[in-house]
Every structure is written in structure tokens, then in C-alpha cells.
Image: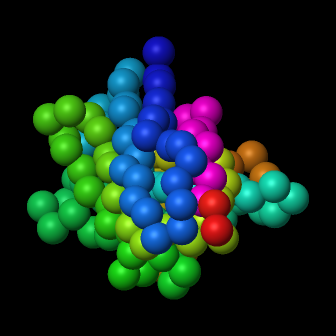
Amino acid sequence: EVQLVESGGGLVQAGGSLRLSCAASGFTFDDYAIGWFRQAPGKEREGVSCISSSSSDGYTYYSDSVKGRFTISSDNAKNTVYLQMNILKPEDTGVYYCAAADPQICGGTYYIIDTAGRPYDYWGQGTQVTVSS
């Protein structure tokens, strides 16, 4: 069974930090890129970051709104991708999801998804991040 399980969300004050984890199972982790998305109440799901762990360089991409504050990384031995979030802002509040896709997806347009979440093949259930001001 394919599973993506997010963890690490919570309530934090503005300026604080959280580290999210995305644990994958049921598929060959090295064959996929992992993207992080978030969705605030009443808003569309937006791309936050992406990593293509199959590349030795580990290609990474970030949205402009998190660049310099968030860092994505991958531990292939643990089939886990992390999202280190620093200097959190109230506008970072939302449900954070990880998703798996073909590595070619992790490029400049990684954040483009349709209403069914494609082209990402697998999605986790999400973890809530709340940043208080």
C-alpha cells in the first residue's frame, strides 16, 4: 500500500520554527520527486517546495514566499523528506501536504496541479501548521 504520512505540524509563534516530515512507503522512493504544498482556509492549494531525490545533486525548488526561510531535504535511507521552516509568519498557516511525482515534475513548474492533484501520483493526508502573531 502506498502511503505518504506527514508529521511535525503544530502551533508556533511568529518567528519560530517547525520541521515537517514526510515518510513514504509502498513505492520506490528514489524513483520519485517529493513536493510540499499548503492550503490555507478558503484558498487554493499552493506549491511550497520540491526535491528530486533521485538526482545526486538533489534538485530543489522553492516558492518565492518561502525562499530563504524554508529548506527541503531528503533522507533516502529513511524514505523521508523534511521541510525545515524557519522565521515562520502568520501567512504560513495552513495544512501542509506532501506529494510524490515523476522526478521530471520537480522543475520550475512543480507547483502546477489540477483539481485532482495531478501530475502528482500520491498525496498524504496533511499536517496542520498554525502560526500565531
- Measured as percent of width and height from the top left, residue 55 is found at 20, 60
Q: Position of residue 61 (x, y in %)?
A: 39, 73
- As drawn, is 74 to the left or to the right of 85? left
Tell me what residue is drawn at x 78 percent, y 62 percent: 44
Q: Nearer the viewer, residue 81 or 88?
A: 88
Tell me the magenta residue range.
120-131
The structure residue drawn at horizontal position 55% and vertical position 80%, both measured from the top left corner, is 65
Q: Residue furthest right?
A: 42
Image quadrant in which you'd find residue 133: bottom right
Q: Residue at x 36, y 81 (%)?
A: 68
Task: Tell me if residue 97 can be seen.
Answer: no
Within the magenta stretch, is there residue 87? no
Q: Is residue 104 left or right of residue 13?
A: left
Where is residue 70 shown, x and y percent of the image? Answer: 39, 69
- In this picture the colour scheme is rainbow
Asked where in the image residue 47 lies, by quadrant, the reply is bottom right
Q: Which is nearer the eye, 87 or 62?
A: 87
Residue 78 versus residue 75 in the image, above or below = above
Q: Position of residue 86 (x, y in %)?
A: 39, 67
Q: Nearer the viewer, residue 33 or 38?
A: 38
Q: Is residue 121 above or below residue 48?
A: above
Image side of residue 99 versus residue 128, left or right: left
Point 61% across, 33% down: residue: 125
Please, is residue 65 above or below residue 88 in the view? below
